[in-house]
């Protein structure tokens, strides 16, 4: 039998044990079988309900099969069957929720730019309603449905934009002005404290949403099927209301780990840097800029800048100096890390 440490190590690396060349459904089944093998060979075997695990994987396979046949409605229904399963002892057993209090989230948004000019603050928000034709089919994106995408670090934004010219791409820091709840689909990190059946159940969807794309950049990517069905469920289940209780209980968006994390492309291999957040627009209240009033009410942001602009205005007499005994990581003393520190101290304003 595996020791606790061995089982934890296998679970933390489960998402990496994937043959991208295999058929998508075969990859899902392979992940299921590896998970069950780890459980069967660990002390969790007596506390895990195997049927709860098989339920998710079986329904996900049915969802993918329905999607491939063009039955989108049935594809979504198969996912709903286990998320809202009435026979499970606790509803939403497969979902982790991340509660973020006002002003706790300071994340970043970036946009490519072909010149050294800066975008306006309104241009740094989500794609406006009148430009829905620009919204492509991505991992947590439905074609034509605008969303606000932000990253936990400037580095994450840069990677997600496929490494644009660092001298020109625009950056802004975004802060939440209200309590916000995300469906937490970030890759799980097991340790001795959370090595439990509950954490196993809540880790399945993040694993299923973290398959790397075999045909990234093409019009259709099989591995995005489940993430997109979850996004569709989130969008359709939210209701805009003046009720504070309803706003508190709702999920405003999803958070997830970039598939670049822990690959040969990743320069830092720190999961905290590679967390992304997505908040879909809500309702039909659109302001004069074509932006969702709901999102504009929830978030404030700094004036956009770029590394070029920051270098020009930098006070060279007070350059940050790193000493060996300081409490920081390698990333925090890079240009991206230092710029994040500056932006967090600047003025945040809502778009009115």
Image (cartoon, helix red, strand yellow):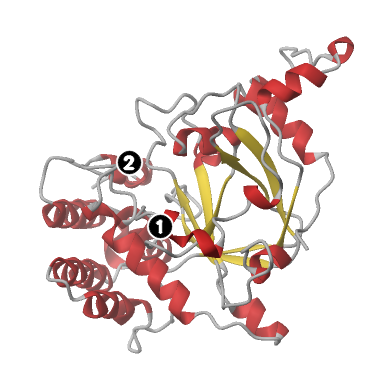
Of callouts 2 and 1, the N-terminal one? 2
231 up-or-down from 303: above or below: below
Residue 53 occupies quadrant:
bottom left
Report whether 215 appears left or right of 95.
left
Task: Please name the residue shown 21% across and 42% down the image.
Answer: 214
Q: Say few, some or many: other residues with alpha carbon within 10 Å of mark 1 (under 14 / 14 to 19 / 20 or more).
A: many
Pick whichever, 97 or 294, lies toward us: 294
Give the x, y percent position of residue 238.
Answer: 52, 79
Residue at x-position 24% and y-position 74%: 72
Residue situated in front as seen by the camera: 150 or 29: 150
Q: Nearer the viewer, residue 55 or 115?
A: 115
Give the percent coordinates (x, y) of residue 71.
18, 76
Where, quadrant-wise, is the C terminus in this rendering? bottom right
- Horizontal and vertical percent for residue 340? 70, 33
Tag 2: Cα neighbours inside 10 Å, few (<14), some, or many (≥20)?
few
Residue named by callout 2: 13
Label for residue 140? 1
Measured from the top left, where is residue 278 in percent x and y?
Answer: 52, 57
Identify the disc placed on residue 46: none
Relative to residue 23, is residue 83 drawn left or right?
Answer: right
The answer to whether the residue labelled 2 contacts the one labelled 1, judged by CB atoms less than 8 Å apart, is no
- Mark 2 vs mark 1, CA separation in Å: 23 Å
Q: Is residue 165 visible?
A: yes
């Amino acid at each position: 039998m595996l020791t606790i440490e061995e089982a934890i190590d296998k679970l933390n690396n489960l998402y990496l044990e994937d043959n991208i060349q295999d058929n998508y459904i075969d990859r899902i089944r392979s992940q299921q079988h590896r998970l069950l093998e780890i459980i069967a060979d660990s002390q969790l075997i007596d506390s895990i309900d195997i049927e709860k695990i098989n339920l998710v994987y079986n329904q996900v396979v049915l969802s993918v099969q329905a999607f491939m046949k063009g039955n989108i409605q049935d594809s979504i229904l198969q996912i709903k069957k286990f998320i809202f399963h009435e026979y499970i002892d606790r509803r939403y057993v497969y979902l982790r929720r991340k509660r973020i209090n006002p002003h706790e989230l300071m994340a970043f948004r970036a946009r490519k730019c072909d010149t050294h000019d800066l975008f306006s603050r309104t241009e740094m928000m989500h794609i406006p309603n009148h430009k829905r034709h620009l919204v492509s089919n991505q991992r947590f994106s439905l074609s034509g449905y605008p969303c606000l995408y932000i990253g936990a670090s400037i580095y994450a934004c840069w990677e997600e934009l496929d490494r644009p010219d660092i001298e020109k791409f625009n950056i802004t820091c975004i802060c939440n002005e209200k309590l916000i709840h995300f469906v937490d689909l970030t890759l799980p990190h097991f340790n001795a404290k959370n090595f439990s059946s509950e954490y196993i159940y809540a880790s399945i969807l993040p694993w299923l949403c973290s398959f790397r794309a075999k045909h990234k950049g093409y019009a259709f990517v099989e591995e995005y099927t489940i993430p997109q069905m979850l996004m569709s469920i989130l969008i359709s289940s939210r209701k805009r209301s003046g009720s504070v209780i309803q706003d508190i209980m709702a999920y405003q968006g999803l958070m997830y780990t970039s598939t670049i994390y822990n690959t040969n492309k990743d320069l830092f291999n720190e999961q905290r840097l590679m967390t992304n957040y997505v908040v879909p627009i809500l309702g039909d209240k659109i302001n004069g800029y074509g932006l969702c009033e709901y999102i504009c009410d929830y978030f404030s942001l700094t004036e956009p800048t770029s590394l070029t602009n920051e270098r020009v205005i930098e006070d060279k007499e007070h350059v940050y100096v790193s000493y060996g005994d300081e409490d920081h990581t390698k990333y925090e003393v890079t240009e991206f890390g230092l710029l994040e520190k500056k932006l967090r101290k600047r003025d945040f304003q809502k778009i009115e």
